[in-house]
Amino acid sequence: MAIEGLPPFIAAQLNFLLSRSPISIRMEQMWSGSKNDPYIDRFTLLIPFCLDYIKWTIIYNVQNPLTAPDMIFGPDDESFFPFLLSADGEGDASRKSPINFLSNWDSRDPSRLLSLILQLRDLYSAYQRKRVGEVDDERVKFEISTILSREGIEMSMSSGVEKTEEVKFAVPLLDMDINKLVPACPWRHPQKIYLQVIYPIGRKYSYAPSSPFLKLVSTPELRSLFCVEDVKLASWLDGMCMAEYLPSLEETLQMQILEAVTLIGVRRQFIEALAPVFGRPLEADPMFCRKATVLVGNGSFTFLVHFIVPSQFPKQQPTLVLQSSQHFNSQGMPIRSHPLSDYPWSPRWEAPQMAERIFDFLVDESLNFKKYCNEPHLQQH
């Protein structure tokens, strides 16, 4: 990935970070620190942490791009001093400290920036864990004592003048490799599901509810296979803790994910059943079988039918969108119908019958769509 305006050594390190990072780090903006120099030497990175993003600014010196960069952490982390905290270490701890890392900076090594960011992120995680451990809240202290041994948990403390104080836990679920469940898996990063647990911390004389806020969160790419929004979370009972809540949740999730994998084959059968009725699809999603497009004609009127197949198929029917190949709007774009899902459907039908019933529906619907395309206010002027 070429990034214009960056000195070569800086560009190599940033490219390596964005393409090789084991976590999904994003670049938000770039700019130059000098009005008289065309080279860009600073940028902000969005680094995933505890199901949110922390924003760090990386500042190189365009006049001397071979030196190590400076860093500015977020405005809410004024007490995060990773370089000071690690400078007094001895032996192996000292050699691995960011201070030692920066003092031995090798600008020719494209992996240096990524290594620095990951190291600082580990220190930031330890910093947030220490903050949470100091919270004067018995519920939080008890939760930490029961789940501290669980691998991969992240936690953070948010506070401020205009913010409600709260403790957030990001709990990774399922000891299974979801990527390996999907043949020819296209995902670069491991797919994960987390339980976000948020405890509001009551200020003095205020009431703090005993039940936390719960939400399932997944890596974005997993939505093509499985939507965590479709999972109904069990109620949190009085006196319950995460150690009690998690086992049944993980059991439910594991069964639903395995079912989602089998549903790929069910969707594939449906898309294959379109060919005898509509003709061979022009396009189809070969991996998760969530989309397909066919060309349909009714007399002289030809149009495309886009099938959007939900992950819960066949319980949920496909959404259809019609697109004319002969009519265009004032912006020169093909006219499309509104999403259509109100047509005869039964999840108990076999795939060929599903395709035939949709075809019968489209015979009549195509006439309505043709009239819609010919409405004067839609036509290109």
Image (spheres, helix red, strand yellow):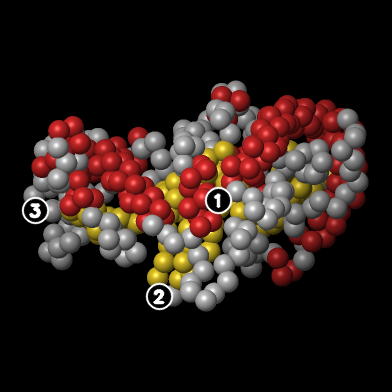
Mark 1 surroundings: few (<14), some (14-19) or many (≥20) residues within 10 A = many
Question: Considering only order in the chain, which callout, 3 or 2, is on the residue closer to the N terminus?
Answer: 3
Horizontal side, residue 182 vs residue 28: left or right: right
Circle 3 is placed at which residue position?
A: 63
Q: Is residue 93 left or right of residue 21?
A: left
- Of the image marks 1 and 2, the number of the one nearer the N terminus: 2
Q: Position of residue 226 (x, y in %)?
A: 65, 39
Q: Of the two numbered discs 3 and 1 on the same chain, state the one appearing first in sequence.
A: 3
Residue 328, picture quadrant: bottom right
Say if residue 85 shows up in the picture: yes
Q: CA distance from mark 2 to mark 3?
A: 40 Å
Q: CA distance from mark 1 to mark 2?
A: 24 Å
Residue 38 or residue 323, whichever sits in front = 38
Q: Quadrant of the N terminus?
A: top left
Q: Residue at x 40, y 75 (%)?
A: 161
Secondary element type, mark 3: loop
Of residues 302 and 21, the one nearer the viewer is 21
- Mark 1 and mark 2 in contact? Answer it, CB < 8 Å: no
Q: Amino acid at mark 2?
A: Val
Label 1, on which residue? 196
The residue that appears at 79% across and 48% down in the rendered structure is 301
Quarter containing the C terminus: bottom right
- The span from disc 3 to disc 1 (Cα, nearest Å) is 44 Å
Which is nearer the eye, 191 or 80?
A: 80
